[in-house]
Image (cartoon, rainbow, N blue to C red):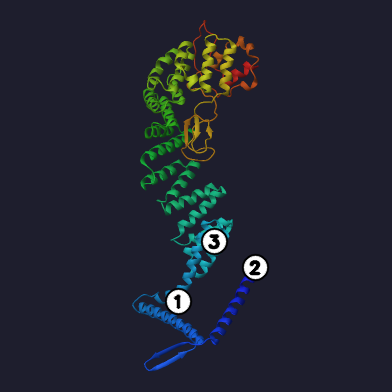
Amino acid sequence: MLWSLFKILFFVVAVGALTLGAEYLLESEGGVQLTMAGWEITLGPLQSVIAGIVLLVVVWLFLKLLSLLVAVWRFLNGDETAISRYFNRNRERKGFQALSEGMMALASGEGRVALAKAAKAEKYLQNPELTNLLTAQAAELSGDRKKAEETYKKLIASDATRFVGVRGIMKQRLSEGDMETARKLAEKAFELKPKHEETQDVLLTLQAQAHDWAGARRTLSAKLKHGSLPRDVHRRRDAVLALSEARDVLAEDSSIEAREAAIEANRMSPDLIPAAVMAARSYIEKGKPKLAVRVLKKAWEVHPHPELASAFAEIVPDETPKERIKRFVALTRIKPDHPETRLVLAELNLAAEDFPEARRSLGDLVDRLGDARALTIMAAIERGEGAEDAVVKGWLARALNAPRGPQWVCDNCQTVHSDWTPICENCNSFDTLSWRAPATAEVSSATGFQMLPLIVGSLEDKSKLEDIPEAEIIDEPEITEASAETDTAAPAVEEVTTPVAEVLTDDKK
């Protein structure tokens, strides 16, 4: 309304100004005198103004005619589109101006404005290859998903824009959560442009989520081939995919194929802990303990880990605790000062009821690490050495409130996982789990030795722990069985077959 009123007022003022100007020119004296070839022409003020305007129009018409003559000359010399370009130049100018304004509106987040400018550009240019993409993106921004999909389908019809159309519909399916259709579209987009890095990443993620490990490995090889992935990263991620494929095959009871895939994954990336563990266990099943030892030692050199120690213990499952300590020297001497090595030694000596040696192995880890696992081991040592219940309970109380130590944590979303997986269960990121200390986690035992029966003592002493609050029950996963020798000088320790949580629950009762 205000804009219309402004235009009316402007028109009235313009007409008034022109009228006053014409009246002034009529009343003024003088003018313009032209002399040429014996001719003399005198023009009054108003006539001079009119002559100037006519001259400008004539010059403009002359330039237009000259441009037309140039276009005709080019046409006669073989340029078949010269004349059509001449007549369409003004339309193209308006069309490209609308296209430019639409792109600016799209970048500014003005979806409706961009959609209107795209329609105007299409009207003038009549070139869908240029305007359909702007129309589709503007429709997405403004929330018109139906129009966006229709426009993307138009793009698919042309060879020049087919990739853009497929990629646009793929992104729509991803936002809708239709992962299966999105994966098929990603495969098509990858087929059209195998060098497109974003499409490679999307396809790799979708294939990993769908457990299409063979397809994911092909996509990963394509990334390496086209230079979008460093060779060392490719080797690591290919090992992750091979390991994932092995785990799926193992779940289908095809143990031979799983063992071979696990060994292949370990060969490609010896530092991948789950691959080393699975490869070692496959060698154990084949009756090749020396190869299992070699695999675990190589992985331990890179990163000591409780799962490696557990697999090392499985090589000789029926040995005594003292025999196990002696055999573990091959592993623990590799990195003797690493916290995991010292914790393993402490647990081994606890199983053998050598409490002073367990204390020496633990050293200052209680103060330096201060996590639940170190504190729990310290409580077991105190119980084994005959400390009072109040001392043992004090260590347990500290363990319950202490950090839980390293766990499998996603580097992308910081989600804690109880077991290693190639895909984060929370954010679906690929190969983002690392073994480190999160904010909170569960207590885990490294080598499969029960030490909490040592904390609570014999079954006859359970009545002494009736005052332990229910909140102090540790939620601990079941730990592997281990044999223990009975010593009359130490608290009574029965053969370990009970989960830690069950032991503590009985004690609370």
Q: Earlier in the sequence, mark 3 or mark 2?
A: 2
**Pointer 1: what residue?**
87
Q: Quadrant of residue 61?
A: bottom left
User: Residues under labels 1 and 3: Cα distance?
Assistant: 27 Å
Of tags 3 and 2, the one toward the viewer is 2
Q: Which mark is residue 114?
A: 3
Q: Residue at x 40, y 15 (%)?
A: 326
- Asked if residue 362 is positioned above or below residue 193 in the image, the reply reads above
Q: Residue at x 49, y 35 (%)?
A: 421
User: Residues under labels 3 and 2: Cα distance?
Assistant: 25 Å
- In the displayed orientation, state which residue is furthest to the bottom: 38
Packing grade of label 1 (10 A; few <14, some 14-19, many >=20) is: few
Q: Residue at x 46, y 62 (%)?
A: 158
Residue kind at label 3, given as amino acid type: Ala
Q: Which mark is residue 306?
A: none
Q: For this rendering, which residue is in front, 263 or 121? A: 121
The kind of secondary structure element at disc 1 is helix
The kind of secondary structure element at disc 2 is helix
**Going by the image, does 472 lie left or right of 348?**
right
Give the total of numbered labels. Answer: 3
Residue kind at label 1, given as amino acid type: Phe
**Going by the image, does 390 lie left or right of 104?**
right
The kind of secondary structure element at disc 3 is helix
**Pointer 2: what residue?**
2
Residue kind at label 2, given as amino acid type: Leu
